[in-house]
């Protein structure tokens, strides 16, 4: 499983590329429960 730091790094990378990718990353992270 990805750690919180890795999830944040992926989210930041997605946000840099575009908000659509950032939303997808956020939803994926939430589904896995990384935010909690």
Image: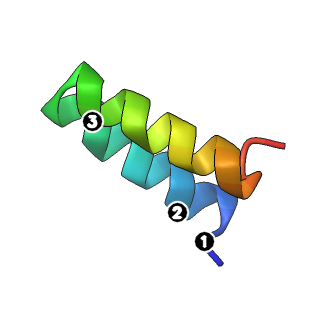
Q: Are marks 1 and 2 in contact (CB under 8 Å)?
A: yes
Instruction: For marks 3 and 2, give the one nearer the viewer.
Output: 3
Identified at 52% across, 63% down, the residue is 6
Tag 1 secondary structure: loop
Most foreground residue, 15 or 21: 21
Q: With 3 as the anchor, is 16 left or right in this view?
A: left
Q: Is residue 13 above or below residue 19?
A: below
Q: CA distance from mark 1 to mark 3?
A: 18 Å
Tag 2 secondary structure: helix
Q: Position of residue 3 (x, y in %)?
A: 66, 67
Q: Which residue is mark 1?
A: 2
Most foreground residue, 18 or 8: 18
Name the colouring of the figure. rainbow
Identified at 18% across, 26% down, the residue is 18
Q: Position of residue 30 (x, y in %)?
A: 67, 42
Instruction: For marks 1 and 2, give the one nearer the viewer.
Output: 1
Q: Which residue is mark 2?
A: 6
Identified at 54% across, 37% down, the residue is 27
Query: Could you classify mark 2 by the number of other residues whose Cα lies within 10 Å: few (under 14), some (14-19), or many (20 or more)?
Result: few
Which quadrant of the figure has residue 20?
Answer: top left
Q: Is residue 6 above or below residue 8?
A: below
Instruction: For marks 1 and 3, give the one nearer the viewer.
Output: 3
Which quadrant of the figure has residue 5?
Answer: bottom right
Check the image and name the residue furthest to the bottom.
1
Check the image and name the residue furthest to the right.
36
Q: Which residue is mark 3?
A: 21
Check the image and name the residue furthest to the top.
19
């Amino acid at each position: 499983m990805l750690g919180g730091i890795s999830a944040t790094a992926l989210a930041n990378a997605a946000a840099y590329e575009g908000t659509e990718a950032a939303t997808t990353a956020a939803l994926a992270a939430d589904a896995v429960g990384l935010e909690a």
